[in-house]
Image: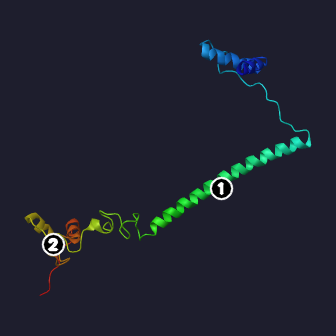
Amino acid sequence: MGIYSYGYKAAKTPIGKKVVDTVKNIFTGGKQKTTGTEVIKSVNPNVPVTKGQKLKRDLKLATQKRKASEARLDSTIFRINQQKKRLEEMKTGPGSANPKRPGKMGGGFMGKRMGYSQGSSKGKVPTTPKEKAFGMLSVNKGLDNNKNITFTDKIAGATGSKKKKKKA
């Protein structure tokens, strides 16, 4: 009787009747009365008149502000802790991202990039006749005495510098 009496009491109010009819239609398979396009026409304003109502309003506003500031503070604390973790991981070694390998850097070509495009100063040892001729360009033009292929050979081949004559 308790459930039915509550539904009976709720059905007497206009909003309660709407709720009861909607629930009944859902269970019985009938059409719903609402389409979702209804608009709220008005809301009763909350204008406190008595001192007690004003205090309640102020308390609610203060509670909302406190919760918002707590959320901001928690976010800030989380970010600070994350930064501390990253800094502690980096302290394990210079340039180390992996704490298990302190002092070790990435790998591959790291550290070899600077000056790599110009080749080494020793030069490549020529093996084919074409390479041997290319390696002798700078020697023939008197720029250096290195028979290996170097950057100077490339410069000598690109420029039209003439052979220097040796004084005897």
Residues packed near mark 1 inside 10 Å, few (<14), some (14 to 19) or many (20 plus): few
Residue 167 vertical position relative to residue 5 in the rendered view, above or below: below
**In this rendering, would 100 be left or right of 131?**
right
Task: Report which residue position mark 1 lands on.
Answer: 73
Q: Is residue 127 visible?
A: yes
Residue 26 is situated, as x and y percent measured from the top left of the image, at 61, 17
Residues packed near mark 2 inside 10 Å, few (<14), some (14 to 19) or many (20 plus): many
- Identify which residue is drawn at 30% across, 67% down: 112
- Identify which residue is drawn at 70% across, 18% down: 20
Residue 83 is situated, as x and y percent measured from the top left of the image, at 53, 61
Q: Nearer the viewer, mark 1 or mark 2?
A: 1
Quarter of the picture containing the N terminus is: top right
Task: Report which residue position mark 2 lands on.
Answer: 148
Residue 140 is situated, as x and y percent measured from the top left of the image, at 14, 74
Residue 66 is situated, as x and y percent measured from the top left of the image, at 73, 51
Q: Which amino acid does label 2 sit on?
A: Asn
Residue at disc 1, secondary structure: helix
Question: Do tag 1 and tag 2 residues touch (Cβ < 8 Å)?
Answer: no
Quarter of the picture containing the C terminus is: bottom left
- Identify which residue is drawn at 74% across, 46% down: 64
**In this rendering, would 22 be left or right of 10?**
left
Q: What residue type is labelled 1?
A: Leu
**In this rendering, would 128 be left or right of 48?**
left
Residue 38 vertical position relative to residue 122 in the rendered view, above or below: above
Pick the front one: 4 or 115: 4
Query: In the rendered structure, which disc, 1 or 2, sits on the residue that comes first in sequence?
Result: 1
